[in-house]
Amino acid sequence: MEEVLSPRVVFPNRVLPYLLVAPQLAITLVFFYWPASQALYQSMLREDPFGLNSSFVWFDNFKRVLSDPSYLNSIKVTAVFSVATAFVAMSVALLLAVMADKVVRGRGLYRTLLIWPYAVAPAIAGMLWLFLFNPSIGTLAYGLRWMGISWDPLLNGTDAMILVVAAASWKQISYNFLFFVAGLQAIPKTLIEAAAIDGAGPTKRFWTIVFPLLAPTTFFLLVINTTYAFIDTFGIIHTVTGGGPGKATETLVYKLYNDGFVNLILGDSAAQSVILMAMVVALAIFQFRFVEKRVHYG
């Protein structure tokens, strides 16, 4: 008689499960909950620039930050930057993944070349794009001027935003490309062949079969790319524009750095970190509560 396999894991004693999860819990406690609780505590303090004297001011730092016009400008800049980066990074990655899925000869080499940019550090990616589009020495900037296109990201805020969005998107395209390729390979070819036999063209087959079946992958990448644009693009902003010109590219995470580590306004910086964390958590909850309902997992 065959033994019925149970999906529930049975441990030999009650202590072993807690020992197995203890390292992960310890790491999360030390590197997330403890710093987060410290930031929440410091956000209610008014400290001198050297941290020698402090007084408890409750929510005064939050009131001052949320009424600061430069902070409200950073929220607008972050919204534009995040939406543009996520859209460009995911659109280009999906296009490249669809093209790579059709390649027959040299498929492995083609995919490897597209994955390489993901190994580049954000600061290095920022320097690369800065040299390419520097208005004085940039090779591609020279090409833009030759075509009669005015380009100066050092003085023009729109040009600076386009440059940091391009650099941040280029850094993330490889990551998105990997997941889209894996999603495309999981789609049964028989569905696409049956649609082709019924007379559906490539465009119709993509929008009616391929794209809906990629919805779980697209939703996952939407969450990851939004979080990446909010938090993980500091190195690119710092190396390419430094938040300028005139705070045109100063995102929330970069303003937090400026106020805390450059201007030494510690209480305001801690309040900004708490607000930024609340924004990212609220955005993730919104995506899972409302956007995920439109995703079909087959």
Image (cartoon, rainbow, N blue to C red):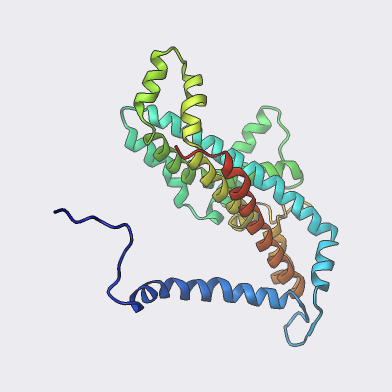
Q: Residue at x 57, y 73 (%)?
A: 33
Work out whether residue 153 can be spotted.
no
Looking at the image, is 3 positioned above or below residue 165? below
Given residues 188 and 238, the one toward you in this image is 188
**Along the horizontal axis of the image, is 113 left or right of 234?**
left
Name of the residue lying farthest toward the front: 1
**Residue 9 in which image quadrant:** bottom left
Name the foreground residue: 201 vs 16: 16
- 203 with respect to 71 (left or right): left
| The furthest residue to the top | 199
179 or 187: nearer the viewer: 187
Q: Nearer the viewer, residue 205 or 178?
A: 205
In the rendered image, the quadrant that contains the C terminus is top left
Q: Quadrant of residue 194?
A: top left
In the displayed structure, 199 sits above or below 11; it is above
Report whether 169 appears left or right of 103. right
Extreme-left residue of the structure: 1
- The residue at 33%/61% (across/down) is 8
x, y percent for residue 157: 76, 45
**Circle count:** 0
From the top left corner, tell me how far across and down residue 66 is, in percent.
82, 62
**Quarter of the image where the N terminus is located:** bottom left
Could you tell me residue 185's position as x and y percent? 37, 35
Is residue 77 left or right of 164 when viewed as pictured?
right
Q: Position of residue 213 (x, y in %)?
A: 46, 34
Query: In which image quadrant can residue 109 be found?
Result: top left
Residue at horizontal 68 percent and vertical 52 percent from the top: 241
